Amino acid sequence: MLFTADIAYPAALPILTRDTAPNPARIRRETLPLDGVWNLSVCGGPSEPVVVPFAPQSKVNGITVPRGKADLRYDRTVELPFDWEGGMLHIEGADHEADVLMNGVKLCRHKGAYDPIGIFVPASVLALGVDGDSTKLHSLTVAVRDYSGRRSIISGKQERQTSEGVIFYGNMSGLWKSVWIERAQTSHINDFKIVASGTGDLTATIDVASPQDGQNVLLTLAHEGLTFSVSGAVEGGRAVLKKHIDDVRAWSLQDPNLYFGTLTLLDHDRRLVDSIETYVGFRTFVMDWDSGYYRLNGQPFYFQGLLNQAIYPDTLYTPTDQHTLTDFEHTLEQGFNGERRHQTTPRHRDLWFADKMGYWLSIELPSARDLLKLGSRANAIAEWGRIIRAYAWNHPCVFFLVPINEDWGMLEHRHHEVKATDTDREAFQIELGLVTEEIAPPGMPYAANDGWRVITSRKFGMPVETLARERLMLNIHDYAENSLLKHIYGRIECWPDRDTWGENPRHVFHSHGYGYDGQTPIMMSEIGGRALLNRPSKGVFAYGKTHTDPEVWAAELAELITLMGTFAFVRGGYVLTQTRDAGNDPDDDTSKGEVNGLLDAQGVLKYPGPVVQEANGKARELWIEGFKATSTACASACMCGCPL
């Protein structure tokens, strides 16, 4: 039987490792990365060099793209071994509509900026390349059309009009994530989904393109000297593999065990057809609705996260490895354990770093401004489904999903001005919720609307079973000052009563007619926004007070974080705004943007002392004490009817 290690690869192709592969969770050994210098023509103008994977508007490229509708044409030559009988071309991000051509042949049209594109390149197209001694040269063109003023397309934090507002930033267009091409036959592994529980149960579903009679799929995994395999026949284009692994080493934040291995497609004679290197983390993360806590591998779990908008002065919306590692390492050192990735999608490599470092991430649908029309809403929902498939599966670090943030797309705010009704907002949450439950990994929690006006499993005092109650999160946002937060929330003991606690003087947390179900663990998924301005600047913004004294700023953050641990009803945890300053360039005193980051925009930790780290530790200690107390005495002490 052939395995990946037995195959001789052309010397012209680089040998990829997980430190260099564009998608470390899916590595084909015969892969050519295509990041680097391309030729770019903007709106029919002369070609100029542009560095992919960064948007033309980023500082590293410095190319102006006109507002409104803009046509961008990317071209480059690709040199591949002459004997390739097919290929898989991957474009991880193209904003907003992309036509992809190779050797003059149109391969696909894709709409959507935040989900990856995967295209099979047939042998007939590769045959059109120009012959060399042992390789062929191929022309690759990606024609991208962007609409920087269109409010009905998914655009995240990109502004839709000049000076739209302090929380919106510059536009990006064209290729803004990695591009690569892999060798693949007509029959190949098209997609796979792996569910691996913390108790050792594994189910892998593998979809095969152009399946042939007698094919089998073999999954081999290894960890710390232990190797096991499971195989199954391809039937109807799909193979389903199931196995229980005794004494499995579960993946957790403290011990992020990964099982590395190979997914292999074999023909009827057991010869290799396709092979992908991958890895698996065995873990079970659920919202335990019966107990009112989140649980990781059966143990109560407490979110202590940061909001990360992943905007960088040099590369705009595209992190580099150094950006991501700096963010993760600094925030782990400060006592946080993950991040809510906000209004953008991560790179495949970001997920790899989180998987191997033990750092949780959420996956979010970047928002549009106006999704009232059915067609726009349908496009957004379809893009969300593709985002889930690309980023939520096969990664133990992904703990929850955010289909909507603060009603964006259906918001009557002055930046949105959408004439939506309560009925419109409710319908949209349900639409996205149903799609999420259908496509996401089984049991993965999601926030029907992260922030406020959330639908729940209770409406007008009666149970509602439209969406799965054991998956519906209640995540709330409040940027009030510490004393006001304490005044509002400090009096809420243990579990709020069922069908109550729908609003406070600042926010309405439940959609019209909905109420708290009495059990869902509540997370304050945006708090803080306190700023430290460590240099002169104009036009900057923060949700809370702007400080110039690092000690005073750190003390206020520490007080806020500790306060979270004292709130009995915040059983899920908290997310502090934010990882880095967003949209603000420290090298440009006229640059605008948010300055409420733990790090400045260049990744420098604003306050290196232990105060914030100690506060996170204290908040966790208080939460543990509260958990122990509610586990034994909540019902009698609080008379709230909680199940613990």
Image (tube, rainbow, N blue to C red):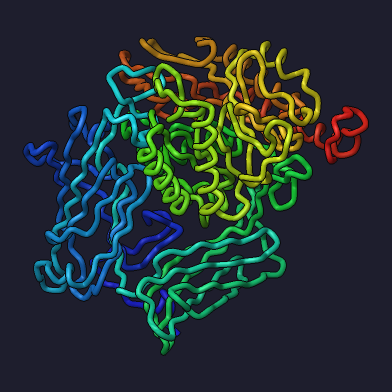
Question: Residue at position x 33%, y 32% from top?
Answer: 316
* Residue 329 makes an appearance in the image: no
Residue extending furthest toward the bottom: 269
Q: Is residue 101 left or right of residue 521?
A: left
User: Image point 77% across, 31% down: which residue?
Assistant: 498
On the rendered image, what quadrant is the C terminus found in? Answer: top right
Residue sitting at x 41%, y 74%: 4
Quadrant housing the N terminus = bottom left
Q: Quadrant of residue 63?
A: top left
Query: Percent position (x, y) of residue 23?
Result: 40, 55
Give the x, y percent position of residue 515. Answer: 69, 30
Q: Position of residue 315 (x, y in %)?
A: 32, 34
Decide which of 161, 280 is in the foreground and name it: 161
Task: Note whether 263 is above or below 480 in the view shown.
Answer: below
* Residue 477 picture quarter: top right
Image: 567 above or below 32: above
Judge left or right: residue 42 versus residue 529: left
Residue 369 place in picture, x, y as percent: 38, 28
Viewer-nearest residue: 98 or 266: 98
